[in-house]
Amino acid sequence: MRFLSVWKISEVILGAFSRAVPRMVL
């Protein structure tokens, strides 16, 4: 199933995005 790998990749991207947003705001 390819959906699982896509979900994992999107989870990693969301994690990095949520960590980068506060730096850009501050």
Image (spheres, rainbow, N blue to C red):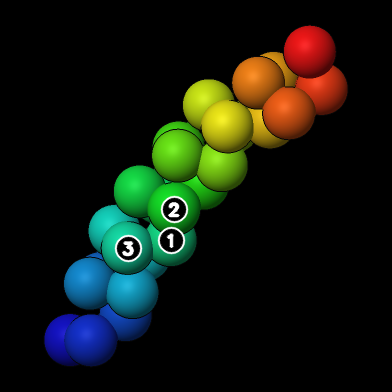
- Depth-wise, is mark 1 or mark 2 nearer the camera? 2
Q: Is residue 26 left or right of residue 2?
A: right
Residues at discs 3 and 1 in contact (Cβ within 8 Å): yes
Quarter where residue 15 is shown: top left
Label 3: which residue? 9
Label 1: which residue? 10
Looking at the rendered structure, the secondary structure element under dot 1 is helix
Q: Is residue 26 above or below residue 9?
A: above
The C terminus: image quadrant: top right
**Viewer-nearest residue: 10 or 20:** 20
Residues at discs 1 and 2 in contact (Cβ within 8 Å): yes
From the top left corner, tell me how far across and down residue 16 is, in percent.
45, 39
Q: Is residue 12 above or below residue 7?
A: above
Q: Amino acid at mark 3?
A: Ile
Q: Is residue 20 left or right of residue 15?
A: right
Label 2: which residue? 13
Q: Amino acid at mark 1?
A: Ser
Q: CA distance from mark 3 to mark 1?
A: 4 Å
Q: CA distance from mark 1 to mark 2?
A: 5 Å
Q: Is residue 8 above or below residue 23?
A: below
